[in-house]
Amino acid sequence: MSGLDGAEVAFGIATYPSFECRHTLLKHKKPLNTLKLNKDSTMLLSGADDGLLLVRNILLGNLEQTISVTFNGPVSATVWTPISPNRPSTTFAFGCADGTMFAYHQTHEDEPYRMTCLVPAHDGRIETLAFDTHHHRIASAGSGCAKVWQLDMEGQNFFPLLSHYANHVAKDISN
């Protein structure tokens, strides 16, 4: 058995790699609700009960941007929405406890993300978000309702496509 030096750790007959903590992610003051890595695992979105969405470069350990939506309550769901295969971290969406869903877009790598759209998506907390890269659609669930939204080709606006109300609350719609 070994420590956090990257060596493998043996348990019985199986061997598992050990991991090293490189960065401690500070800033949130209340419990986390959502964490999402982008496709190439270089950027991380985190949302919490403090009404903050944080965008981090996890390779460098940098906090790239803080987005405060305290008026909308806790950040409850996040999803990367990669429109361009060349730049998979240029767009994302997130949902809040009041049912609002936001879209953010980054035009150039050295610029901050900017809000491009917000919609009152659900009557209450958005429980989960999922993204279909082929059709550029976002699925959302909250308040006993699942909805599908079309994201435009720039990743900047949502258009409602489908709503389905159920007698129970959806907690996960991930693929």
Image (cartoon, rainbow, N blue to C red):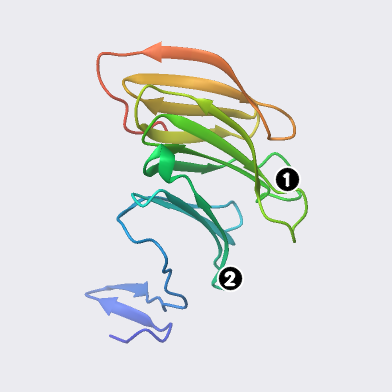
- The residue where tag 1 is placed is 85
**Apparent side of residue 99 relative to residue 85 in the rendered image (left or right):** left
- The residue where tag 2 is placed is 59
Q: Nearer the viewer, residue 72 or 38?
A: 72
Give the mark, 2 or 1, whose residue is nearer the N terminus.
2
Quarter of the rendering occupied by the N terminus: bottom left
Helix, strand or loop status at disc 1: loop
| Residue at the (36%, 36%) spot, across then down | 97
In this rendering, the answer to whether 56 lies above or below 60 is above
Q: Nearer the viewer, residue 98 or 61?
A: 98
Q: Which mark is residue 147?
A: none
**Residue 172: x and y, percent?**
36, 33
The kind of residue on which mark 2 rests is Leu
**Apparent side of residue 13 relative to residue 36 in the rendered image (left or right):** left
Res. 152 visible in picture = yes
The kind of residue on which mark 1 rests is Pro
**How far apart in space, not on screen, are marks 2 and 1 (Cα)?**
20 Å
Q: Residue furthest left?
A: 12
